[in-house]
Amino acid sequence: MKAVVITTPGGPEVLQIQEVEDPKIRDDEVLIRVAATALNRADTLQRQGKYPPPKGDSEYPGLECSGTVEAVGKNVDKWKVGDQVCALVGGGGYAEKVAVPAGQVLPVPSGVSLQDAACFPEVACTVWSTVFMMSRLSPGETFLIHGGSSGIGTFAIQMAKHQGVKVFVTAGSEEKLAACKELGADVCINYKTEDFVARVKQETGGKGVDVILDNIGGPYLQRNIDSLNFDGRLFIIGFMGGTVTEVNLVGLLARRLTVQAAGLRNRSAENKAVIVSEVEKNVWPAIAAGKVKAVVYKRFPLAEVAEAHRVMESSKHIGKILLLT
């Protein structure tokens, strides 16, 4: 099969398509012939040598895919050859075929094309597990999403609005903020021209928001703490701004705050299967009902993977970037 190989750690130019061996499936896995995969920030970090795949997972990049089941292991009964599916994978999405534990496979949501289904596994599993399962965001609460126009952000806005939540977002351009507003965001803040803490306080009568989803890390920690309401929850899923900071902890105690962080890729197969099952139960009906839509910025053929990475690293995109095999 063809797969995208990271020939050496570096810039987008190190990504090359090569002929490699087909993956072999274990008894509890399915083999998917990939129709599409979607880019995630983690892919660019892996390309730079900063985020290796977990032990036992494919060395090729790609954390999600959609396609058709081509073979099933002997212990798999939920899926059969020919099923159209999408999946959360630990690696290997940037290839013509990928082996995936059966518990990480989802049906293509009703009303979504096979290609566009590749948009959903990583964002849905990340947002549902962090914001809803762990931070317990509930109807009537307020929710701040940093990077509202990203793949995660565009999904989180729609899912939170569907749940009856008031949504705040930050983004870095008027075009991105307009896209967030169109998806349902209630309060859109340009972090380049406005202090998000002041705006959050102003819009909440001085209280702050109930939950924050953050991918910046260090530089935003104090400001996020300052933006939270009593019993507020901050969830950190990335460190695009760095990992080190100095923080005044008084607000944590005074307002009973919770700070959590987690990734998805390094969780066990059992843990991922629980999240995937919850996503199928809670998110897939919202997609089928048209309440949550795929937001695709651009589709590239697999051969143009380097250009796709350049677009992601330019941060000009709104929503997801797909690679079609």
Image: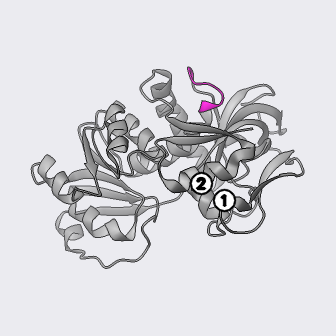
Front-most of residues 117 and 268: 117
Which residue position holds label 1?
Answer: 12
Front-most of residues 301 and 138: 301
Can you tell which quarter of the image residue 325 is in? top right
Amino acid on which disc 2 is placed: Arg
Q: Is residue 233 above or below residue 88?
A: below
Which x, y percent locates residue 294? 51, 32
Do the residues under discs 1 and 2 have CB atoms within 8 angstroms?
yes
Question: Label 2's element?
Answer: helix
Which x, y percent locates residue 296? 53, 35
Is 120 positioned to the left or the right of 79 in the image?
left
* Residue 310: mark: 2
Which secondary structure class fits the magenta region best?
loop
The residue sitting at 69% across, 49% down in the picture is 305
Amino acid on which disc 1 is placed: Pro
106 in magenta: no
Is 108 positioned to the left or the right of 95 in the image?
left
Is 190 positioned to the left or the right of 70 in the image?
left
**Mark 1 or mark 2: which comes first in sequence?**
1
Residue 302 seen in the current view: yes
Q: Is residue 68 above or below residue 96?
A: above
Which x, y percent locates residue 110? 57, 21
Region in magenta: 110-116
